[in-house]
Image (cartoon, rainbow, N blue to C red):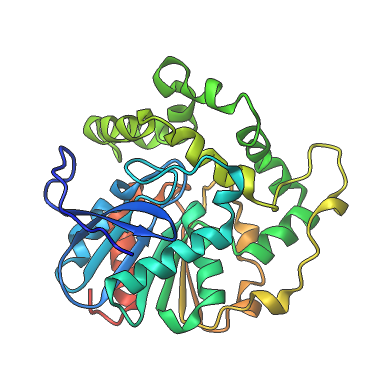
Amino acid sequence: MDDEQDEPMPLGGEFEHHEVVVNGVRLHYAAAGAGPVMLFVHGFPEFWYTWRHQLRHFRASHRVIAPDMRGYNLSDKPPRVEQYAAPQIVEDLRQLIAHLGAARVVLVAHDWGGAIAWAFAIAHPELVERLVIVNAPHPWVFLREFRQNPAQREASQYMRFFRSAEAEARLSADDFKALWEFTYAVPHRRGHVDDADRAAYLAAWRRPGALTGGLNWYRATPLVPPAKGESADGLPDLKPDGFRVRVPTLVIWGMRDSALLPGNLDGLADLVPDLQILRIPEATHWVVEEVPDQVNRAIEGFLGGTG
């Protein structure tokens, strides 16, 4: 099942780097520390490196693990869109946790990683000690917002572009200029992301197949905002009872997220009874990059000061 090995890395040499085969795909992951497992799950267009600040902080008390998810950076990039459906990726995490020998984990996730973490906690609550979600909508709430909130439908139109056949060419042109502008350009200008970080992200995006792998997460999801002027009737009909989260959960939300609006927090406690929400007024979607120390303190407090 597993094929773990140390791999020399020009980036992130302060961490261990391993590979393991789970669910038919080879995943690369960064690791450090010892103790209870904290598993960090990135989104688009990120990779393990997104969690570098958290890995450094929590390795003093935990075994910290940050994989490149399927489709990204050094991990395998399956060729078919359906191979990026949420149940496949949830199973990646389940088998990774089994490989790590952890009975339960603290699961921390951002963006698309958060969408998978919500699904994972719903499907496998026995494997999640605590759940930390950073700017990632709960799936049923996101569906509700698509149905009822025109502002969220408008803010999510980029998802339709990401699913399109021309997305790769347009996002990668001029050495990923458009992708950079859409994501880290503002944090870079504000000093939250430095030139070395920019080089790290560009190197990950340049890997053959990596951009398509990330975009395929968008292409595989059934949760797609209706086009402008379209009815929401074509959206899936999901019942909230199937989406209740029965583990202690902390949601950290950068309130200036222009893609995932604060309405995604409304009514969340009805689906997540053991819930804490930290709203960070000045932060955007890239809150992990912008205020890493504040994120770390919030997680540490949620864990009972054990971080």
Residue at position x 18%, y 55% from top?
5
Residue 224 % position (x, y): 71, 47
Residue at position x 39%, y 65% from top?
108
Q: How many marks?
A: 0
12 vs 256, nearest the viewer: 12
Residue at position x 23%, y 79% from top?
306
307 vs 202, nearest the viewer: 202
Q: Which quadrant is home to the C terminus?
A: bottom left
Q: Is residue 77 above or below residue 236?
A: above
Which residue lies most toward the top here? 174
Image-based side of 145 in relation to 52, left or right:
right
Q: Is residue 89 above or below residue 267?
A: above
153 vs 124, nearest the viewer: 124
Q: Is residue 14 above or below residue 183?
A: below
Image-based side of 107 in relation to 10, left or right:
right
Residue 87 visible in the shown view: yes
Residue 210 % position (x, y): 42, 36
Residue 178 % position (x, y): 49, 24
Residue at position x 47%, y 17% from top?
173
Q: Which quadrant is home to the N terminus?
A: bottom left
Residue 151 % position (x, y): 72, 46
Q: Is residue 237 above or below residue 25?
A: below
